[in-house]
């Protein structure tokens, strides 16, 4: 079998996912190709048609993760709870959906910083699909608290209601062990100082990777925080996706080297 893989979203031209697919195919000794597909917020019907007709498996990025939930015949537990899908698999004529973003993030901070998040206090900036998946992964990994800071109050309230130990930003525990920026790079308001409770002890992760060093991340580095961009999460969530597709182990550290 020659696997037909790809990644869909918008904008998509910068995506590094095809490189990850190619590297993982080589790891497991499978044949296949991967390509980028530009699909945006108005393309739900097209996404459903394209994935079932042209692909065996597909990665989803913004703004399609919510659409993935709607078109699947079956969802895994995490995708059902978060209402976010980043991985599609066509199996026996049915479209299956999964979410590996949360576990991918947790694995990335463990691999990059040696940070076991169990018992930590976390701040997440943003309340969209990526933030929701990350919060789900953090809660399942045993964090002590997650404070959510976002402009969409309804989404924040939904996250607070869904989980124990998730709070509105006004109830942030200080000091902060881990801060995560999961807001889109477009439309950010540039911070002039780090928030109270964040310091040299705080790991700061910006899940964007274009630019590699965002203004937000640079600010935290100047404050002494160990920091990372989203490449680690990208590699680890991709490794989990492809393990799900193929039931084969995928070395996320090797994938990260491919795109770093």
Image: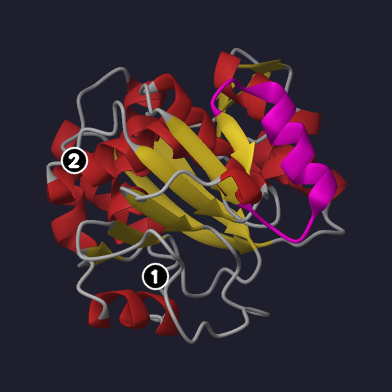
Mark 1 and mark 2 residues within 8 Å of each other at the beta carbon: no
Residue 222 visible here: yes
The x and y percentages for residue 143 are 38, 28
Q: Relative to residue 127, is residue 2 drawn left or right?
A: left
Magenta stretch containing residue 72, yes or no? no
Q: Relative to residue 189, is residue 27 drawn left or right?
A: left
The x and y percentages for residue 64 are 70, 50
Q: Residue 128 bears which disc, if any? A: none
Q: Residue at x 18, y 60 (%)?
A: 258
| In the rendered image, the vertical position of residue 142 relative to residue 46, given as above or below | above
User: Would you call the spot at circle 1 few (<14 residues within 10 Å), some (14-19), or many (20 or more)?
Assistant: some
User: Which scheme is used to colour this image of the protein?
Assistant: secondary structure
Magenta stretch containing residue 157, yes or no? yes
Q: Residue at x 44, y 81 (%)?
A: 193
| In the rendered image, the vertical position of residue 143 relative to residue 13, given as above or below | above
Q: Secondary structure at mark 1?
A: loop
Q: Relative to residue 141, is residue 53 drawn left or right?
A: right
> If the image is split into quadrants, where does the C terminus sit?
bottom left
Q: Which residue is mark 1?
A: 209
Q: Secondary structure at mark 2?
A: loop
| In the rendered image, the vertical position of residue 251 relative to residue 113, given as above or below | above
The x and y percentages for residue 50 are 71, 45
> If the image is split into quadrants, where does the N terminus sit?
top left
Indicate which disc, 1 or 2, sits on the residue closer to the N terminus.
2
In magenta, the rendered stretch is 149-165
Indicate which label's residue lies in the foreground, 1 or 2.
2
Q: Residue at x 83, y 55 (%)?
A: 43
In this view of the protein, which residue sits in the foreground, 68 or 33?
68
Q: Which residue is mark 2?
A: 115
The x and y percentages for residue 11 are 62, 72
């Amino acid at each position: 079998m020659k696997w037909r893989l790809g990644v869909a979203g918008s904008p998509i031209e910068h995506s590094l996912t095809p490189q990850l697919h190619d590297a993982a195919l080589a790891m497991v000794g499978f044949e296949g190709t991967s390509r980028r597909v530009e699909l945006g917020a108005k393309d739900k019907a097209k996404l459903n048609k394209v994935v079932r007709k042209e692909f065996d498996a597909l990665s989803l990025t913004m703004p399609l993760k919510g659409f993935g939930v709607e078109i699947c015949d079956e969802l895994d537990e995490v995708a059902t709870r978060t209402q976010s899908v980043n991985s599609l698999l066509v199996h026996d004529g049915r479209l299956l959906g999964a979410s590996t973003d949360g576990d991918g993030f947790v694995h990335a901070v463990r691999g990059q910083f040696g940070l076991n998040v169990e018992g930590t206090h976390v701040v997440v900036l943003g309340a969209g699909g990526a933030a929701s998946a990350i919060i789900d992964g953090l809660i399942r990994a045993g964090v002590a608290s997650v404070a959510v800071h976002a402009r969409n109050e309804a989404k924040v309230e939904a996250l607070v209601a869904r989980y124990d130990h998730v709070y509105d930003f006004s109830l942030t525990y200080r000091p902060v062990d881990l801060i995560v920026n999961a807001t889109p790079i477009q439309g950010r308001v540039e911070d002039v100082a780090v928030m109270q409770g964040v310091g040299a002890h705080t790991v700061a992760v910006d899940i964007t990777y274009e630019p590699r060093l965002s203004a937000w991340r640079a600010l935290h580095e100047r404050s002494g925080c160990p920091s990372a961009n989203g490449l680690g999460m990208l590699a680890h969530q991709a490794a989990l996706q492809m393990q799900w597709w193929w039931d084969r182990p995928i070395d996320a550290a090797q994938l990260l080297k491919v795109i770093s």
